[in-house]
């Protein structure tokens, strides 16, 4: 039987190797990536059935990368494997097209089960995140109103600023003008009721929009 084609994306080499060894008996690992931009550029060429990706990756976080990939590969299944146990983060992932959300500290069987469920057309979330929740957890995650949502471009600008790039540096990476970067920065601050650049960076770190 032909094994499903899977792409892996994580900026920690040891985690990538462990994940590859765990999944290879059941899945064909067709590519690995260590940052979000490389993932978005390279994954579509590999025609994967599923992508296992971290949220906190350099240059472009997993949520932004996943949002772009769902536009490029509508049928691909996104399985997030992350340290972040925040329900709001899981909610954001599902609302952006995720099929599964798995915590890295979970058993290895968790990620295998999540991939299998996603490829069958279902959804999966690590049980530790669903304690005390009633009804269809995935449905609740997908339908709940999103608050303080940033646009994809705003999240890209915010991540690069949080990684220490100047506004000119961000403009160069994103191929836009510094004035456009400044517009996005101050629009975000107004939208989030944030008064300083330091608070904006703190927001990015709390939301795992930047790899620490």
Image (tube, rainbow, N blue to C red):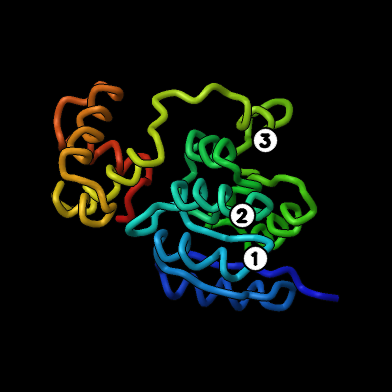
Say if 120 sits above or below 151 in the image.
Answer: below
Quadrant into which the N terminus falls:
bottom right
Q: Which mark is residue 143?
A: none
- Write down the residue under mark 3: 138
Picture quarter containing residue 206? Answer: top left
Say which label, 3 or 2, has the lower sequence index: 2
Label 1 Cα neighbours within 10 Å, binned few <14 / some 14-19 / many ≥20: many
User: Which one is nearer the viewer's eye here, 205 or 50?
Assistant: 50
Rounded to the nearest angstrom, the CA distance separating label 1 from label 2 is 9 Å
Label 3 Cα neighbours within 10 Å, binned few <14 / some 14-19 / many ≥20: some
Say if 148 sits above or below 154 in the image.
Answer: above
User: Which one is nearer the viewer's eye here, 20 or 164?
Assistant: 164
Q: Which mark is residue 48?
A: 1
Q: Residue at x 69, y 55 (%)?
A: 114
Whether residue 126 is visible to the viewer of this picture, yes or no, is no
Q: Residue at x 62, y 75 (%)?
A: 29
* Rendering coords of residue 84 (x, y %): 46, 47
Instruction: State if disc 3 and disc 1 touch (CB < 8 Å).
Output: no
Instruction: State if disc 2 and disc 1 touch (CB < 8 Å).
Output: yes
């Amino acid at each position: 039987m032909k094994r499903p084609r899977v792409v892996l994306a994580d900026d920690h080499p040891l985690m990538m190797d462990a994940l590859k060894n765990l999944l290879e008996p059941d899945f064909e690992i067709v590519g690995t990536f260590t940052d979000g931009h490389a993932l978005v550029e390279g994954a579509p060429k590999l025609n994967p059935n599923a992508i296992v990706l971290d949220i906190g990756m350099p240059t472009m976080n997993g949520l932004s990368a996943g949002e772009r990939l769902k536009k490029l590969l509508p049928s691909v299944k996104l399985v997030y494997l992350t340290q972040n146990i925040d329900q709001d983060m899981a909610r954001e992932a599902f609302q952006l097209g995720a099929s599964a959300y798995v915590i890295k500290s979970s058993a290895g069987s968790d990620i295998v089960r999540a991939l299998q469920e996603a490829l069958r057309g279902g959804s999966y979330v690590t049980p530790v995140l669903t304690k005390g929740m009633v009804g269809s957890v995935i449905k609740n995650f997908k339908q709940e109103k999103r608050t303080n949502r940033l646009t994809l471009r705003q999240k890209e600008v915010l991540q690069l600023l949080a990684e220490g790039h100047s506004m000119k540096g961000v403009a160069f990476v994103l191929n836009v003008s510094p004035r456009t970067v400044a517009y996005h920065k101050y629009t975000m601050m107004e939208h989030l009721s944030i008064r300083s650049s330091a608070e904006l960076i703190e927001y990015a770190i709390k939301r795992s929009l930047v790899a620490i």
